[in-house]
Amino acid sequence: MEPETSKAQLRSRIRAARADRSLAEAAPASSSSVATTSPQVTPADATPTSTSPADAVAAAAWNVIREVPVRSLLAYAALPGEPDLDPALDRFLAVGGTVYLPVVTKVGEPLMFGKVTGPMAGLKPWGRWGIREPARDGTLLTAAQLLSPTVGLDLIFVPALGFGADGARLGNGGGFYDRTFGPHGASPLDSASLGSGPLGSGPLGSGLLGSGPRVLGVCFAEELDLTGLVAEDWDLRIPAAVTEDGTHIFTA
């Protein structure tokens, strides 16, 4: 890659854009931009006049979850600035779904995984990065255990700062997902062997002929097709991603 499109520079640029977006979304709306609802329309039936990209990503993720039966899934607890899937995950938990989240046990080691046992807002941040994680109560799973038939994982949401045109993933630089699910990781997720479970047919399963869980990256639409970003030998490559615009399928 050329210096101007290096991963470090891409990370810096995207993090700055995400910080700006978070500040803009946190700013109070002006009185002229506040929509009023007709007395004949209940708030539940009202169509919002605008939706933030972060809210729209969660809505798109929920559409994926409800499109076909999903029993259990792996997601993530968003850090500030990341697309926040909490609303979708809470809805899934409320209807009896099972959610697993990654747990960082040690720098340089693969991820472990824990089950969420309550609302996402009840999770506490842990470690040097302040990532919200399930309780470390001795029931953590390895990647191999998580992907076993016993768990029956149907769907995986993988966070990212963005993706190249071929699905190359730009992570935060810690290498945890590559070390866990990459081609040389503890339990590689080979996109050629994924997707013929419940999520493997129809538009979301197009071109994926295996029997594993459906794997979807998560980012904002403007973070797709990052110029110059390609997967290296050890990098996890993702077949599709969810953004505020819906599901985007990457070219091979």
Image (cartoon, helix red, strand yellow):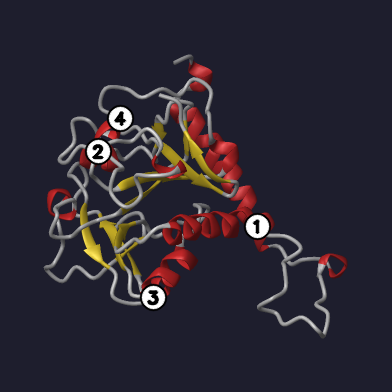
Say which of 6 and 74 sits in front: 74
Q: In this figure, which residue is indicated by the disc labeled 4? A: 235
Residue at (42, 73) in percent of width and height: 121
Q: In this figure, which residue is indicated by the disc labeled 2? A: 210
* Left or right, residue 61 beside residue 198: right
Which comes sooner in the sequence, label 3 or label 4? 3
Quadrant in which residue 220 is drawn: top right
Question: Badges 4 and 1: C-beta atoms under 8 Å apart?
Answer: no
Quadrant in which residue 35 is drawn: bottom right
Residue at (73, 60) in percent of width and height: 50
User: What's the CA distance linking mark 4 and mark 2?
Assistant: 20 Å
Q: Callout 3: helix, strand or loop? A: loop
Which comes sooner in the sequence, label 1 or label 3? 1
Which comes sooner in the sequence, label 4 or label 1? 1
Question: Badges 3 and 2: C-beta atoms under 8 Å apart?
Answer: no
Question: Residue 240's x, y, as percent?
Answer: 43, 38
Disc 4 residue type?
Asp
Q: In this figure, which residue is indicated by the disc labeled 1? A: 52
Which comes sooner in the sequence, label 2 or label 1? 1
Disc 3 residue type?
Val
